[in-house]
């Protein structure tokens, strides 16, 4: 199966490539601008505060404390604005990590990541052949490679992003119920998986898969009940020591924040910061060019729109939610460019 790029006329194709190149140049310019150093909520660099704080919470839970008691003590001590329920992670992932022996959470995520990677390879191999499949394997494998670090398992964003990749791959294989269950599991791990769930539900509605629509609605209602219970438990913990943040979550970080989020991308995070300026447009191009990439493309675009407005500078680790999906597009984007070069040489 060829990409959508191959199906375009010559003028249209070069127009798409020109827009992609222009986007890369703009983003490179943004990436090269000096940015102020920001501190995490716990006083460290980007994401360091949340990482250290939730490691301490999990350690206390393993010592016998309940999640909300442990979270309240640590979050207040670390200077978090605890009066907002959105500054408290929902308990499913910390409770699971605390219940498992040390290292097992990382192993569990590693198995889900491997399953998602193998399924992604199978889907792309079927849709485009060995070349795009290998490119996707390398790109997505690098994104998931951050799981080699034990601390990565602490981030519920990493867990939710890994499960969403499995969901996309399962949908690609035609395993719709497996994809749906995985999507809902990602939502229960982190409420920021909601854009993915909404996109998947809208696609099911558009294609009139009524059983799936009912399941998405039922899952959403179940999550609303779960989040309401979470909100009630948070309210029981609040007292005179709790405070609000001076600033809200709506920061309009725009392209700068999006580039920082794209840079939080497994082993690709070790590359120079300007690489994100190339990855972002190439990933979008590839997801559009991949005829089976509608769900992944819709989810990534939804995250880009949301995070352009919402998120503080130290929340760049939210990129772990969508970068595995974006890297699917990087593999396809590179393959689309290879197709164009082959056609030009043939002419």
Image (cartoon, grey):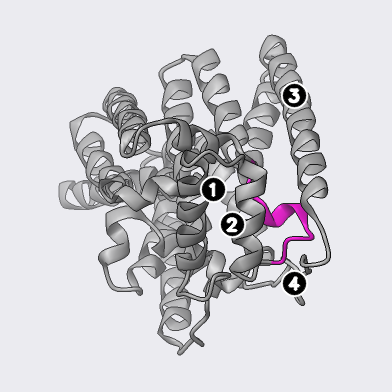
Q: What stretch is highlighted in magenta?
A: 81-90
Q: Which of marks 4 and 3 is nearer the N terminus?
A: 3
Depth-wise, is mark 1 or mark 3 nearer the camera? 3
- The answer to whether residue 212 is left or right of residue 112 is right
**Residue 245 badge:** 4
Q: Give the labeled residue for mark 1.
A: 300
Which residue lies at the image location 46% right of the left edge and 15% below the top edge? 174
Q: Do the residues labelled 4 and 3 touch (CB within 8 Å)?
A: no
Q: Give the labeled residue for mark 2.
A: 304
Q: Earlier in the sequence, mark 4 or mark 2?
A: 4
Q: Which of marks 1 and 4 is nearer the N terminus?
A: 4
Q: Earlier in the sequence, mark 2 or mark 3?
A: 3
Depth-wise, is mark 4 or mark 2 nearer the camera? 4
Q: Residues within 10 Å of mark 2 (few under 14, many from 20)?
A: many
- The answer to whether residue 56 is left or right of residue 185 is left
Depth-wise, is mark 4 or mark 3 nearer the camera? 4
Find out whether residue 86 is within the magenta segment: yes
Q: Where is residue 192 in the image (x, y as percent from the top left)?
A: 63, 46
User: Regarding mark 3 in the picture, which secondary structure is present there?
Assistant: helix
Q: Which of marks 1 and 3 is nearer the N terminus?
A: 3
User: Regarding mark 2 in the picture, which secondary structure is present there?
Assistant: helix
Q: Which residue lies furthest to the top in this view?
A: 211
User: Disc 4 and disc 3: Cα gap in Å?
Assistant: 30 Å
**Residue 167 badge:** none
Which residue lies at the image location 75% right of the left edge and 19% below the top edge? 218
User: Disc 2 and disc 3: Cα gap in Å?
Assistant: 27 Å
**Main structural element of the magenta stretch: helix, strand or loop?**
loop
């Amino acid at each position: 199966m060829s990409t959508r790029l191959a199906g375009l006329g010559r003028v249209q194709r070069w127009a798409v490539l020109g827009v992609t190149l222009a986007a890369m140049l703009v983003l490179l310019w943004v990436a090269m601008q000096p940015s102020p150093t920001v501190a995490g909520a716990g006083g460290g660099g980007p994401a360091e505060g949340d990482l250290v704080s939730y490691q301490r919470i999990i350690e206390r839970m393993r010592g016998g404390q309940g999640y909300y008691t442990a979270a309240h003590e640590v979050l207040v001590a670390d200077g978090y604005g605890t009066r907002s329920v959105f500054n408290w992670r929902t308990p499913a992932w910390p409770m699971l990590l605390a219940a498992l022996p040390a290292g097992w959470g990382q192993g569990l995520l590693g198995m889900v990541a491997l399953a998602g990677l193998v399924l992604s390879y199978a889907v792309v191999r079927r849709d485009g052949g060995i070349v795009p499949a290998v490119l996707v394997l390398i790109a997505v494998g690098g994104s998931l490679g951050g799981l080699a670090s034990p601390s990565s398992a602490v981030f519920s964003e990493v867990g939710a992003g890994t499960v969403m990749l499995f969901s996309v791959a399962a949908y690609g294989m035609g395993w719709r119920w497996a994809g749906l269950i995985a999507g809902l599991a990602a939502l229960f791990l982190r409420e920021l998986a909601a854009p993915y769930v909404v996109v998947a539900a809208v696609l099911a509605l558009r294609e009139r898969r009524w059983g799936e629509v009912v399941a998405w609605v039922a899952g959403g209602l179940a999550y609303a009940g779960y989040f309401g219970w979470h909100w009630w438990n948070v309210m029981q913990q609040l007292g005179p020591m709790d405070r609000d943040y001076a600033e809200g979550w709506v920061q309009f970080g725009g392209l700068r924040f999006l580039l920082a989020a794209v840079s939080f991308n497994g082993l690709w995070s070790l590359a120079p910061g300007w690489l994100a300026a190339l990855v972002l447009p190439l990933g979008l191009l590839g997801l559009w060019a991949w005829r089976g990439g509608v769900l992944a493309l819709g989810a990534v675009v939804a995250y880009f729109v949301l995070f352009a407005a919402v998120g503080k500078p130290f929340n760049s680790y939210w990129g772990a939610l969508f970068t595995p999906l974006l890297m699917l597009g990087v593999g396809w984007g590179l393959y689309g460019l290879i197709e164009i070069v082959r056609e030009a040489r043939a002419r």
